[in-house]
Amino acid sequence: MRYAKVAFEDVTVGDELPRLVKGPIEQIQLTRYAGASGDFNPIHQDEAFARAAGMGGVFAHGMLSMGFVAQAITDWAGAGTVRKLGVRFAALVRLTDVVTCRGRVLSKSSKDDVDLVELEVWAENQRGEKVVSGRATVALASRG
Amino acid sequence: MPIQVDRSVVGKEYPPFPVTVERGKIKEFARAIGDLNPFYLDDRVGAASAWGDVIAPPTFAVTFRDERADAGALLRDLGVDISRVLHGEQEFEIFRQLIPGETYLCRTKVVDLYEKTGKSGPMAFVVRETAITDRANEIVATMRHVTVIRL
């Protein structure tokens, strides 16, 4: 079921997270994300501005793709489980791109009664090129 | 001829600014990402949860902005035009969930600036860290932003 939390005991190193497919990216989503996030850099909205800046046209906010990656994690682990999420924006996401968010379990540990899972996370476009790569730490509940 | 950035910005601490998290802003942000998780959007699910209310998505703190302390302020200090800027890296560490109605204090400082030459030419990387604390001055979350400037 969607939004079900995975239990710590049921996670094995090497497990892959379910893939989350987002897009195709439309201009309206970038406009909406600008309003929601407060990032009004015209490079994400104004084709002429983006071309004049040498970027070859508008591209998505990196933070939108990071939001997609965060969603892929919480769809699997549950809301409120992310303790740390760090990413590098490896390539630009363009209009019409389809972004697939992925992840893999790197390690498990328990410290101070908290059960933590370390993840490799990334997102790739429809050509399989990485657009985001990073790491995350989630705190999972036990099956109890 | 590459542009010069003002390196004296390293170590600068921007004025602390308060932010009160709004319920509608959380929902607007989640919907803009297309993340319809009920723990962000459904007040009844939030009320019945361990947090007693809806919570913010993991990247929500990026909405915490103040014109005297945001990326625009950084660019003014660096003497750089916004058209040269890319987002290089971002990190969030979350110690407690951000919930509606709470007021937090954000403190941002510039911790590093280094230059590298990539395949698209010389670039400067400016690293900022933001600490987010609650009314009791306890740390709730941190953000680390790496801004890339095409020189």
Image: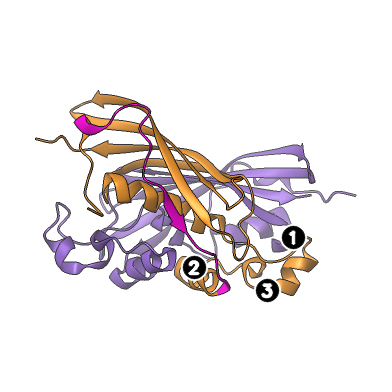
Question: Which element type, helix, strand or loop, lies under badge 1?
Answer: loop
**Amino acid residing under circle 2:** Tyr
Residues at discs 1 and 2 in contact (Cβ within 8 Å)? no
- Discs 3 and 2 carry the same chain letter: yes
Q: Residue at x 37, y 71 (%)?
A: B28
- Please tell me whether residue A119 is drawn above or below residue A89 in the rendered image: above
**Amino acid residing under circle 1:** Met
The residue closer to the viewer here, B77 or B72, is B72
Magenta segment range? A9-27
Chain letter, orange: A
Is A15 one of the magenta-colored residues? yes
**Marked residue chain, label 1:** A
Question: Which element type, helix, strand or loop, lies under badge 2?
Answer: helix
Question: Which element type, helix, strand or loop, lies under badge 3?
Answer: loop
Spatial distance from mark 3 to mark 1, Cα to Cα? 11 Å
Chain letter, purple: B
Q: Position of residue A94 (x, y in %)?
A: 63, 61
**Marked residue chain, label 2:** A
Q: In terms of sequence position, does the residue under pointer 1 or pointer 2 come before the other?
A: 2
Image quadrant occupied by the C terminus of chain A: top left
Disc 2 marks which residue?
A33
Disc 3 marks which residue?
A46
Q: Position of residue B116 (x, y in %)?
A: 74, 37
Disc 1 marks which residue?
A55
Q: In terms of sequence position, does the residue under pointer 3 or pointer 2 come before the other?
A: 2
Is B131 one of the magenta-colored residues? no
